Structures are given as structure tokens and as C-alpha cells.
Image (tube, rainbow, N blue to C red):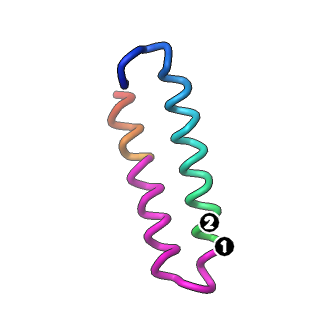
Amino acid sequence: MIGDASLEPIWLSIAVIAVGVLVWGGWRQFRADRTKAILMWICAVVILGNLLILRV
């Protein structure tokens, strides 16, 4: 993935936490500002896509 292979679980954990925070924040933000919420969800999907590409 990035540099040392022993760091891969750490990067994966950080990415999963980031996706979770973006989805949760988008859900909380949805009523106040839908545009911001949708952008947060798009960012989460992009991170997941990058993880899938890097894992293959």
C-alpha cells in the first residue's frame, strides 16, 4: 500500500474510521445542509473506492 507493508493495517484502520466519521457526520448534517451532507457521503465513497483499488 504505502511504504512499509507492516503499516497497512494502520492505514486501513484510519481509512475505515474516516469513512465512519464522514457517514455519521453526513447523517447528522443532512437536515441542516443537504449539500454538505451529500459531499461528505461522496467523500466516504471515494475513500472506499480507493481502498478497493489499493487492495486489488
The amino acid type, in three-letter code, at marker 2 is: Gly
3 falls in the magenta region: no
Q: Residue at x 61, y 52 (%)?
A: 20
Q: Position of residue 19 (x, y in %)?
A: 54, 51
At x 36%, y 19%, the residue is: 3
- 46 and 33: which is toward the camera: 33
Q: Secondary structure at mark 1?
A: helix
The numbered mark at residue 25 is: 2
Image quarter where the N terminus lies is top left
Magenta span main SS: helix
x, y percentage for residue 23? 58, 60
Q: Position of residue 36 (x, y in %)?
A: 48, 76
Neighbor class of circle 2 (other Cα within 10 Å; few <14, some 14-19, many 20+) is: some
Question: The magenta stretch spans which residues?
Answer: 29-47
**Residue 20 horizontal side relative to residue 41, left or right:** right
**Residue 28 numbered mark, or none:** 1
Look at the numbered discs 1 and 2 and tell me whether their residues touch, using CB distance below 8 Å.
yes
In the rendered view, would you say 40 is above or below 50? below
